[in-house]
């Protein structure tokens, strides 16, 4: 038998490369032509990480960089407990397990609650890696479509009931949402809670953007609903809260300790999360409220600039989002993917072009999102204004030739 | 429907907790009685991590802790390329992918080459987490038993052929081996290469203990066999080489770029490996040869002390291992697990007891290893001598009462 028969698994062949990173080669080419590329495609905040993190890491005084505990370092678990206590939630060590980013927490959760072929209901558009993790865990996303004209709020309880079947194990939400920026209301969360009770489902609540809620809205977590406390699995991370994406410190938390105990088996297999990063993360609890206030103010101002700029462009469909740092907008074109590539390859203004994420990859229902893009506002206000200007000019130019 | 019906997945229910960490609660209890517990159960080296690592982390001068590249930071990939070049192996960036410890590299590999139900041949006894990762990846370990009296060297080619079937996708070895300390000969590796060619298999070579080879033996890697270069997948890690277990920096490498490309899909889903740890790891390439020489000398001396001590205990079966820092020994008792627990609960000498890993968890064939333990020699020579003394006394005492 020859090398041609060297096969990869069907499941890995069926997996897709990240649609967010798909355009990277075109962006590289644009940069090598000397252009500036404004990155509206990824959620990498430009906000400074609190120096508490770096100080704690620098002050590590050990001489051997040892394994830490599979559940997480005690001081990090303690600091998470204090953080949640301030939010009115009461956790103990056995409710928590530190993970390699929120990503690993979500994957562990899916693996622990789903048998192969089981289904998880996810409002679409959704964070693309949700389907990567369901793929890897051998289960399946059942999308329930939300719409820009509704501000991407949830459809009715009846719509959910239509897609629940005997294979449905959970509902998974990102709240505040990546990629739509919607913040679900108390009523929406209570509706999900009812569904979970009536249909015996888990509710996986990805709250990594919890602090990013604007316009004086209040964030409401399903963790606050006592009657579903055993059903809620929280996915959390320090990545966005403290602009520490590169630390890869996440958390899975639940009042249902049997879930955390099950996840511990997988955590033991990968031994532990990096020791120094946990040390840095533990120190972040002491970040002053003023940090969050000024970060929130900055993001809200950016959202306003981006939203107002986009609203003024003819035929661009946009509704003002209230959380996270993303929005999904509709464009008057048929293929956002083609347009995004064209912008990187063919268009520039003031030696600058922009990179956006085509939204099709955020939908699992075929055909949806083809004319939409996801924009993040992780760049400064001046650049955001320039980005809006570029988008308007580029759209005009593109529509002439396409 | 009530909470009693909240189910976990069958696959997570079937997974086991780490047998290495199983006795931890008994050890904690012993410590709380005021006893010293000598840890011969885990591979956490006491050797100092080169300060190059900590210096590089401390010198990080960024203000935002950003995501790094999914494949790994360029400077870390470069440093791995230089490391392998010194060993006579020629890799480019597209042959490499940085992982969260060797663990993630192995899991990604299994997922990428195995469909659910496929089989991977592993010489037993093997590192227990190999079966955790095959479980998680939905494939299956096919054990091929090796024996203490052969120094845990491989059985004949015919024995391998007997267990190869149409579902077999790969042979997985740890070389030098955790848990046996065997270093496979060039002839053994060539035999595996032939099998891989004849039966169209991958060869997964876990070489995280590459530097720990004693008695002047030379380490031979399947990477050196040109005819199987497209079949070999290397699992590597800085954890043991530089005593940096807590950094969780591993690597998967292959001349077969289609495998690395496939693994990239999973790597993108988990975004990246921590940024600071990669910075530290990249600096480790500059570790002077004198570090490795003295570390190796130290481990070899420990192995000699442990081996000679154990050889002098009546009815203990031990053969001198030549690599890594583990050995598996046979004891004149029926249940090593019971004995290990008894030692922690009931026995002490000079206010000290020892913790060992019962070897049953390192076998997948039922009934094997019940009278064996795995010992690591990651503690200093004086403590190793005391450990041998304690073991001898404890065995005598235990055999009186059991």
Image (spheres, coloured by chain):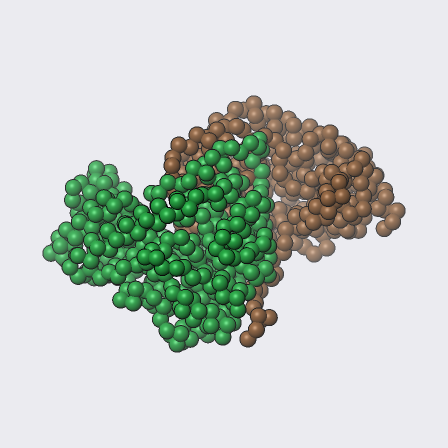
Chain colours: A brown, B green
Quadrant of res B61: top right
Instruction: State the quadrant of the C terminus of chain B.
Output: bottom left
Residue shown at 23%/44% (left/top)?
Answer: B383
- Residue B352 lies, in percent from the top left, at 20, 43
- Residue A258 lies, in percent from the top left, at 40, 48
Residue shown at 72%/38% (left/top)?
Answer: A38
Residue shown at 71%/29% (left/top)?
Answer: A381
Q: Residue furthest right?
A: A400
- Residue B176 lies, in percent from the top left, at 38, 58
Quadrant of res A31: top right
Q: Residue furthest left?
A: B400
Residue shown at 70%/46% (left/top)?
Answer: A28
Rendered position, B231 above or below A259: below
Rendered position, B128 above or below A235: below
- Residue B84 lies, in percent from the top left, at 50, 53
Instruction: Compare residues B259 and B401 and report the one nearer the observer.
Output: B259
Residue A253 visible in rendering: no
Q: Is residue A401 left or right of residue B401?
A: right
Instruction: Compare residues A206 and A223 and report the one nearer the observer.
Output: A206
């Amino acid at each position: 038998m020859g090398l041609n028969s060297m096969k990869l698994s069907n499941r890995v062949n069926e997996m897709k490369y990240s649609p967010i990173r798909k355009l990277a080669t075109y962006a590289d080419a644009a940069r090598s032509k000397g252009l500036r590329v404004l990155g509206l495609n990824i959620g990498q905040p430009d906000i400074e990480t609190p120096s508490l993190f770096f100080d704690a890491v620098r002050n590590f005084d050990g001489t051997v960089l040892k394994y830490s505990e599979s559940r997480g370092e005690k001081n990090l678990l303690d600091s998470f407990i204090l953080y949640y206590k301030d939010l009115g939630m009461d956790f103990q060590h056995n409710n928590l397990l530190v993970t390699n980013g929120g990503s690993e927490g979500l994957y562990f959760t899916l693996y622990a609650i789903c048998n192969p072929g089981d289904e998880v209901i996810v409002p679409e558009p959704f964070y693309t890696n949700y389907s990567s993790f369901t793929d890897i865990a051998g289960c399946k996303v059942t999308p329930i479509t939300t719409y820009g004209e509704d501000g991407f709020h949830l459809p009715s309880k009846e719509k959910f009931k239509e897609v629940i079947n005997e294979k449905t194990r959970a509902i998974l939400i990102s709240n505040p949402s990546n990629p739509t920026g919607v913040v679900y209301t108390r009523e929406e969360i209570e509706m999900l809670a009812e569904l979970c009770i009536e249909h015996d489902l888990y509710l996986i609540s990805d709250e990594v953007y919890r602090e990013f809620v604007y316009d004086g809205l209040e964030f409401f977590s399903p963790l606050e609903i006592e009657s579903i406390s055993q059903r809620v699995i929280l996915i959390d991370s320090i990545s966005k809260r403290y602009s520490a994406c590169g630390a890869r410190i996440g958390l899975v938390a639940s009042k249902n300790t049997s879930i955390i105990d099950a996840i511990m088996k997988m955590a033991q297999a990968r031994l532990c999360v990096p020791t120094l990063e946990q040390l840095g993360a533990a120190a972040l609890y002491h970040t002053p409220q003023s940090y969050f206030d000024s970060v929130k103010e900055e993001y809200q101002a950016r959202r306003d600039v981006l939203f107002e700029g986009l609203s003024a462009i003819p035929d661009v469909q946009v509704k003002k989002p209230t959380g996270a740092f993303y929005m999904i907008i509709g464009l008057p074109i048929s293929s956002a993917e083609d347009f995004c590539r064209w912008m990187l390859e063919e268009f520039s203004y003031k030696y600058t072009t922009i990179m956006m994420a085509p939204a099709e990859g955020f939908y699992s229902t075929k055909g949806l999102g083809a004319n939409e893009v996801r924009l993040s506002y992780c760049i400064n206000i001046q650049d955001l204004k320039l980005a809006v200007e570029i988008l308007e000019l580029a759209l005009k130019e593109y529509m002439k030739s396409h």
